Image (spheres, grey):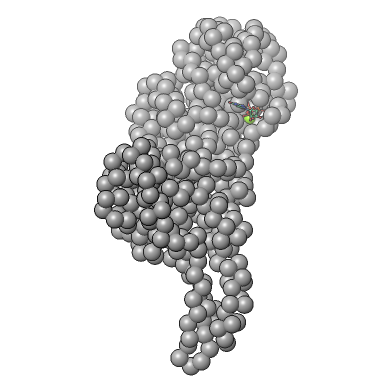
Amino acid sequence: MKDTTMPVFAVVGHPNKGKSSIVATLAQNDAVAISHRSRTTEKATRYTISTAQGSYELIDTPGFQRPTKVLTWLKERCGDASQRLATLRQFIDDPECQQQFPDEVELLTPIVQGAAILYVVDGSRPYSKSYETEMEILLWTGQPSMALINPIQNSDFVDEWERALHQFFKSVTLFNPMLADHTKQIELLDVFAHLNSSWRNQLEKIANALQENFEQRKRNSVNLLCRLLTDVCTHEIEQKVLTEDQAKTIEPILQKRFTSDIKQRESLALQELLANYAHLNTEFSIQQLELPPDLFDCDHWYAWGLNKKQLVIAAAVAGAVSGAAVDLAVAGHSFMLGAIGGGLLGGSSAYFASDKIVNLKVKGLPLGGFTAHYGPIIHKNFPYVIIGRFLFCYQQISQLTHADRRSLSIHATDFQKSIEHLEKSQQKELHQVCAKLSKQRIPEALYTALMPLFD
Ligand SMILES: Nc1nc2c(ncn2[C@@H]2O[C@H](COP(=O)(O)OP(=O)(O)OP(=O)(O)O)[C@@H](O)[C@H]2O)c(=O)[nH]1
Ligand SMILES: [Mg+2]
């Protein structure tokens, strides 16, 4: 085996078995061409996975088209096993073979040049002898190899495949490129590391670096949310007007501009979140994500953020409602509900005096005229709404593999559950930062308070 510095793996197999999907997921590249039609990949294409600790390469290849004819060609020209690699070289260099068997020449070239083999099969289709010809050709290369079973529709034939593949490969692994999360991807890299001892060190370092990348992406996501929250919770617009009446007349226009600003900031943050996870081509339907067209319609807010009861609990936990209520609220869930039923909700209703979201303020100017100020949003639920929606997108985007090309669409969230999973002290910290944000104060502990929601 040639000791190349960079580990290189050629992903090979039958047409349409998910070779490109595996490359897309492992290379975290959503530009890799994938489609349900056969022969989507026609040329061997190299993808370099670069990390701070080193790089490795995956080569996406076309599927075998005429393996039986190729094997016959090889056998006719090969005396004994010692000549197999030389015969393969002859095959890929032969202009006539390049014409007749372009796919096999493409897929075998990188292997003959030193790439290890990742042989991909579909575990939802039965095994058959016809695959043995292509596996035999791969054996001729003498390169390190392993098999990956991709359960495209289901796992019905995985056992059968395992028994057959173990006859040809020492290592056989189940890998679903559509679902493989970060941990599964790193586990697979550990298997690759054992295929060739001279690559092991490097691949282990790369696996560590990918783990660190994953952590960094999480930190970036928290920072994105911190920025978004600070930005939208303090946002305010103003417009010069001649009279106080005029200020009232243009209120709907200011409202429209204000709403559009908020939507645009949220949408930008989500685009950045996608980019943070290298989803550069993923279609993202933000329709359901839009704030209700009428900002004063709070109903959606209670679905995305906290409901009214929870807002009272939050206020109590954050220390915004009197002492006894705090003790009751942190004492336990059932007790909390009891406290609310027993009048906490009614007693503190002044705290949520109205569902008013934004104030319009008109200020006189020293030299005559007025300015109409619209914003910031004063509703206590607003920070939760923004966090809830961002978190929901984060959960989907951070799990989305680069082979999964269905466009993302966002539905209701279960933000309340995410909060319930936090420790009591973490809940308190979150409610405190949200209380500050709704008063347009930028909490120092914002990052620390949000981080636990991303775990
Ligand atoms: N549901 C599901 N579909 C998959 C999976 N892997 C691949 N597919 C689908 O199978 C089809 C073929 O996937 P590709 O990755 O293009 O297959 P390929 O082996 O590269 O195909 P060729 O380049 O044409 O040889 C695509 O429609 C994929 O979306 C999987 O794990 N689950
Ligand atoms: Mg392909």
Name the side, left or right, on which 197 lies relative to 75: left
Specify the quadrant that holds the C terminus: top left
Look at the image and tell me in which quarter the N terminus lies.
top left
Which residue is more in the foreground, 404 or 165?
404
Q: Is residue 294 left or right of residue 366?
A: right
Give the x, y percent position of residue 111. Answer: 54, 24
Residue at (46, 50) in percent of width and height: 308
Which quadrant of the structure image shows residue 55?
top left
Q: Quadrant of ligand 2?
A: top right
Q: Nearer the viewer, residue 197 or 140?
A: 197
397 versus 351 height, above or below: above
Does residue 421 appear left or right of residue 39 in this picture?
A: left
The residue under the point 46% across, 43% down is 415
**In the rendered image, is residue 229 in sight?**
no
Residue 145 vertical placement versus 27 (above, below) = above
**Residue 136 in which image quadrant:** top right
Q: Residue 391 or 17: which is nearer the viewer?
A: 391
Compare residues 122 and 397 and report the one nearer the observer: 397
In the image, is residue 343 above or below residue 175? below
Q: Is residue 207 left or right of residue 239?
A: left
Q: Residue at x 56, y 46 (%)?
A: 280
Q: How many marks?
A: 0
**Residue for point 39% across, 65% down:** 440
Residue 151 is drawn in which quadrant? top right
Above-or-below relation of 76 to 306: above
State the image coordinates of residue 165 (x, y, percent, origin top left).
Answer: 54, 10
Residue 148 shows up from this direction: yes
